[in-house]
Image: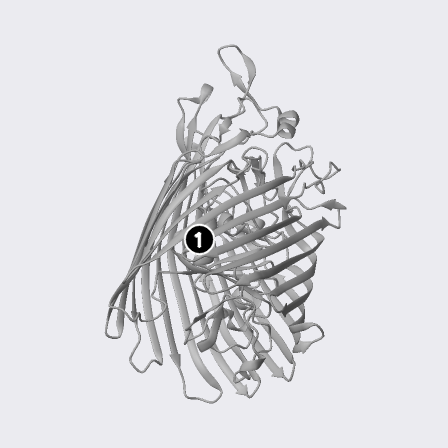
Amino acid sequence: MPLCLVDAQSEQEADAVGYFQLPGTTEGADSEDVYTLEEFTVVAERFGEVGDFSLVSVQVLEAKDLQHQIQSTLGDTLAWEPGLNASYFGPGASRPVVRGLGDYRVRMLVDDIGTLDVSDTSPDHGVPLEPLLIRRVDVHRGPDALLFGNAAIGGAINSKTRYLPEELPERTLSGAVETRYETGADGRSTAAYGTARAGDFALRLTGSRREAGDYSISGQARSDAYQETYNPQVYNPDTSLDEAVPNPSGTVPNTFVETETASVGVLWEPESGRGRLGASYSRYESSYGVPYQYGGDSTELYGDTSLDMRQSRFDLEAAYELDLEWLERIRLRFGHADYSHEELFAGRAKDADKAFEDTTMEQESMEARLDFYHRLFEGLEGVAGVHGFDRDLVASRLAAPPLESSRVSNMYETENLGYFLMETFTVDKWTLRGGYRFERQSIEDLTFEQYGFVRGAKEESHSLSLGATWRDYDRWMFDEVAFTGNLSRIERIPSETELYAFWSNAAIQRFVVGSPDLGVERSHAVEFGFEAHRGDWSGRLNVYRYDFKDFIFLQDIKGLGSLAQYVAKDAVFLGGEAELTWLVFDNENSSLRLKGMFDMVSGENLDDDTSLPRIPPMRIGSRVEYTQGPWSLGADLRYVFEQDEVQEESDVVLPELETDDYFEFNLDTKYTWALSDADLELFARLENVLDVERRTHASFLKDVAPLPGRSLSLGMKLSF
């Protein structure tokens, strides 16, 4: 699919999407010096977006390019991309994993500010986003913390939604309706959005509904290694004996999904075109099941867990262009959200009469950023800003389920404020970039406030990134070639959960303990990139190394049952990504394009000399795309290597099971009718054609819930 590497100093009125744009492009460059690597679409962004001044390459994924691989969650939708994996916790919850890093180190964003949820606190918590209503996804790998927060050491996933019109539409009424059916889980989904314009105003409405049952698999749910290691059993009071827990075959029970969304937004752009003011309200509701995982004791509660989650969100955007020589525009983004969910237990077998609410979470949060885009003199431009958030989280859990009298609550208040400056200087063939960000964060644990005991943590972090790109045309054998190097020193402040957790997490079957004495996590990173274009060929290669001081992660403690604690260890991540595209031919009526990809990452706990948990395995793959008139055909092939570099049993950690390799093959097709005032698309996708067993090593559930088996998706989309 098309890929865009967004130029750090590109002008907002020429934000290019869908092609390689190597750093160093300057306004007014001669036309003969521009080499497009793939077909592209120019997106008018008069007021700019935060990613305009990224220190590293930004991968831009348009909705039309994601259409053939859309899943029920954003994590699974993006997991096909180089350098990206998913934390897969069933069809209802899955976050992206970037270069082996996830959770708090990957910032999940909606239109440049946070998703304002609790998905980073536990992998069973979903992200309140409907992939069918996302118009674009910007994937920021590496040290983008300067833009989105120092916590984003791994990167950021910035979803551009349809809550607000991107601009005033030319037509009075425009929009789209899309519907899909998927055989593997008897899934049905429908999404629609429409925009009405009246003068300088535009009104946008969106809505969606998704429902699916338990999804099908090619074999049994639990892996052979898991069965042999844990031998799940449940106590039978009728016989006073432990009996084997059946290993589901053909489907993964309790993996249903039901989701509904709705939003309304209004945009005002005066005729002068210098100002923009928009506001939107959105509502997200989802109910989904979590696959069963053995807790290690046959007498424990036996049954299914599901989540009911909801979020109400208000967003505001304002921007204005100025006539000042040194200050070009100002942009404000603000978001406020009320989020809550309940984790519901429904007993089976010996516990069939038990049904109760276990964990509940409520969070009120707000986030805002104010960006000042400036050009100090010819060749030097950048963005400075202030960015922060405030959240109040209340988590309530049963200490001794199902006894409601055992309920205990945890209350946290977190405030974060940051300032950043990023500059880009272009001279001749060189583009130099530098940035700095300061953050101050305070956390108060108010759990025992009524007893006169309040604890907290106040930390500051300083982060710095430096980068340089050399680019030239008609150099050596290439039409265009570029080399990029980035250095960064990023500091991350630990979260409430990492500091103060002390509760049982039924989703991952562990009793989680925080460490109040955790300090700031530091990462020193170096990244090198090479990009080139020659004729019908284009490609990129990135290699990186992250050296962590006090890398914070959840470590299983040997000899203490299911106890896991947040610890800080020195760690190192090494990896790389590559893509290669060959446009075999492209004439007036048909085209053929071949694409290849490769990615790998390794993570090592240097203090204990063990591998870090849940590190994705190496992958290679390709995609073939053929178009003939209104028809398009595609085939995906990917080989995922086995992951045998896992935690081995040692004095301090429990062993991690290996994950087998697999080969994946998918087919898709689309037919487009160009009507007088609309376009109608019919599309189909056959996923996992060979019906092989696929397990995601980055998931806590990889040994009890494989990815879906063979499934056929059919759909249509009407755009007008």
How many discs appear?
1
Q: How is the image coloured?
A: one colour
Tell me if residue 377 comes above or below residue 142 in the rendering: below
Q: Is residue 102 above or below residue 690?
A: below
Residue 377 in picture, x, y percent from top left: 55, 88
Q: Amino acid at mark 1?
A: Gln
> Which sits in the foreground, 711 or 159?
711
Observer able to see residue 643: yes
Q: Horizontal and vertical percent for residue 292? A: 51, 31
Q: Which residue is mark 1?
A: 67
Q: Image quadrant of residue 475?
A: bottom right
The quadrant of the image that shows the C terminus is bottom left
Q: With respect to residue 541, does 182 lie above or below?
A: above
The spot of residue 496 in percent (x, y) is: 53, 52
> As rendered, which of 343 and 445 lies closer to the eye?
343
Q: Residue at x 67, y 37 (%)?
A: 658
- Residue 270 placement, left or right of 690: left
Residue at 40% across, 48% down? 683
Q: Visible in this render: residue 292? A: no
598 vs 668, left or right, is right
